[in-house]
Image: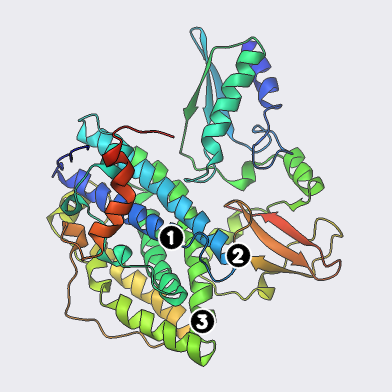
Amino acid sequence: MQGSIDLDHRSAVQYLLRIGDTCLILGQRLSEWCGHAPVLEEDIAMANMALDLIGQARAVLTHAGAIEGRGRDEDQLAFLRDERDYRNLTLVELPRGDFAFTVMRNAMVATLMKLLWERLVDSSDEELAGIAGKAVKEARYHQQHAADWVVRLGDGTAESRRRTEAALRELWLYMPELFESDAVDDACQAIALGPRWIDLREPWLAEMRSILDEATLAMPAESAFRSSGKRGLHSEHMGYILADMQFLQRAFPGGVW
Amino acid sequence: MRCQQAWDVLDTVLDPEVPALSVRELGLVRDVVERGDTLDIVLTPTYSGCPATEVIERSVIDAIDAAGIGPARVTLQRAPAWTTDWISETGKRKLLEYGIAPPGPVAAEHAVTIRIVGRRADAAIACPRCGSHHTERLSAFGSTACKSLHRCLDCREPFEHFKAI
């Protein structure tokens, strides 16, 4: 059994882990659709987007490991941290739900990531800027795909609309966390590593509003609830997804394909 | 001399997922530099999660070794990001002959923030078989992340399109 590694609390590392972990956990959730999506085309789409996200996570986690300077690679960071050392948004760890829930979440996350990568293209960190230059193209496509589906289901049959509205209501509870900024954000903005996430809020709301309008769905009011995955305090679902992801590396340390 | 030979060899290394094109025609090769005894082949990955990247690295090194001009190593260069605009004209022609509709120029795509399109509204892609523009998109993703799936409404054949990114 492989023990856990501890976490580096420097701001730049934390900032990168928030990005890398969000991509990693959503990639893991989307990969669960493989063999289960309602139609073959969407099965393939989910698997392809999961691949993009895991590719982005690999690049960002590798870079986080390099900044740490403690010789840890992407695999060690992905598989050997404990739950509270993950910095992903709570939103992405929620179970995949039905297809309406999946595409609504994808629309919310891809819109955020697109706006974030667009800003990170100008990061003072050249490696991060390079990763962003590639990832922004992928996030743009993911957003397009998800938005098409939100419109199709929201403005679809009575049943698809009912499910899409329910998904939106539940997911919107986790929206405020996307734009909570703290000392990590301030420190990283100061060195021009990347933007404070709160500064992405207005453009995000504007893009989401255009998608929801087209889907004839009303934007819910903001809830008082605050999830806290970015600070390492996760929902009850996080432990299970990590058990799934980490089992092999914990049971067979250093195992490779 | 050795670098020129290497470029020629790279023209024979086929992409594992679109085996009609060489990695050079796909625009993956940024540079070939001689560093001491070793040839440094600089490649740009296509998609962040492309499972072919590692296979391509291996095939490039093997091909250079087989041509007797090794040893070689591969360096991945992420910036500037790969774009389908780097696929050569020959490459685009080979894609078409292989039955895959080649990508158009990228520039126009990026000016748009977000657009909601139905399947039929996205139909400017010409059918690689009969040339008709009367086509529709069936799926945003095809057999690989870099392609989407379409159908020609005239000759009724399905086909793949290499997406412009």
- Give me the disc on residue A153: 3
Left or right for A113, reference B113? left
**Relative to A62, residue A24 above or below:** below
Q: Which residue is mark 1?
A: A32
Q: Earlier in the sequence, mark 2 or mark 1?
A: 1
**Callout 3: 10 Å neighbours few (<14), some, many (20+)?**
many
Numbered disc 3: secondary structure: helix
Residue B142 vertical position relative to residue B35 in the rendered view, above or below: below
Chain letter of mark 3 equals A
Q: Nearer the viewer, mark 1 or mark 3?
A: 1
| Callout 2 amino acid | Leu
Q: Is residue A8 left or right of residue B128?
A: left
Of A33 and A14, which appears nearest the observer? A33
Could you give the CA–CA distance between mark 3 and mark 2, rounded to whole angstroms? 17 Å
Q: Earlier in the sequence, mark 3 or mark 2?
A: 2
Which element is circle 1 on? loop
